[in-house]
Amino acid sequence: MITIHGMNASGNCYKLQLLLSQLDRPYRWNEMDLFNGATRTPEFLAKNPNGKVPLLELEDGRCLPESNAILCYLAEGTPYLPDDRWSRAQAMQWLFFEQYSHEPYVAVARFIAKFLPADHPRRAELPRLRERAHQALAVMERELATRDFIVDAGYTIADIALYAYTHDAPAGGIELAGYPHVQAWLRRVESQPRFLAQQN
């Protein structure tokens, strides 16, 4: 059985929980206490020198870090990663968008607002993070005005990746009221078979 080393509060880890639920694939979950250095131990660094979760560990001991790489690996040969070359490239495009233009702002604002004390100096970053988060959401809003899911082929790991932090954006002070197409898309994702809500 595969093992996922992760943290329930992390959207990047939740992506894998959601996909594995929808694949109806069994796995072992190893909850990591990041706030107390669980990913900085010699044992964990031997598995992932970058010291981050999520981390997929296969039955033979091979380890794969980075949430979107793990999504691609797990979704290979399933409808969640299209066989068609163009549709697959579109899915990859949105995975890169999520990690470069979306997650660094939506997720970081969520982390600061949700987990750091009210007097923490990093709260000074929130206005800029929220501004950039709204830019990413505006891109999604335009795309979702013309289709049900983020890729023409239908529901894919691109939706899973983007859903993971978008659905909890208000926790970072990023309101979704101005994005009706994004809100409708969130509901469509939540209506998919074997949908799993985040456990945090």
Image (cartoon, grey):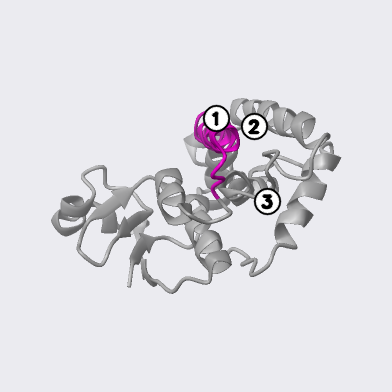
Among the 4 quarters of the image, the one containing residue 194: bottom right
Nearer mark to the viewer, of 1 and 3: 3
Quick check: 140 left or right of 21? right
* Mark 2–mark 1 CB contact (< 8 Å): no
- Which residue type does callout 3 highlight? His
Q: In this view, does 58 lie above or below 99?
A: below
Residue on which disc 3 sits: 167
The disc at residue 125 is 1
Main secondary structure along the magenta-highlighted residues: helix
Residue beneath the point at 40% across and 51% down: 73
The disc at residue 133 is 2
User: 85 or 21: which is nearer to us?
Assistant: 85
User: 116 or 161: which is nearer to us?
Assistant: 161
Say which element carries label 1.
helix
Question: Within the magenta stretch, is there residue 84?
Answer: yes
The disc at residue 83 is none
Residue 111 spot, x, y in % from top left: 53, 46
User: 23 or 119: which is nearer to us?
Assistant: 23
Residue 107 spot, x, y in % from top left: 55, 42
Among the 4 quarters of the image, the one containing residue 79: bottom right
What are the residue bounds of the magenta stretch? 81-105
**Number of numbered callouts drawn:** 3
Residue 23 visible to an observer of this rendering: yes
Q: Distance between the residues labelled 3 and 2?
A: 13 Å
Q: Earlier in the sequence, mark 1 or mark 3?
A: 1
Q: Distance between the residues labelled 2 and 1?
A: 12 Å
- Which residue type does callout 2 highlight? Ala
Disc 3 crowd rating (10 Å Cα; few below 14, some 14-19, many 20+) is some
Say which element carries label 2.
helix
Quadrant where the N terminus sits is: bottom left
Residue beneath the point at 74% across and 29% down: 138
Q: Earlier in the sequence, mark 3 or mark 2?
A: 2
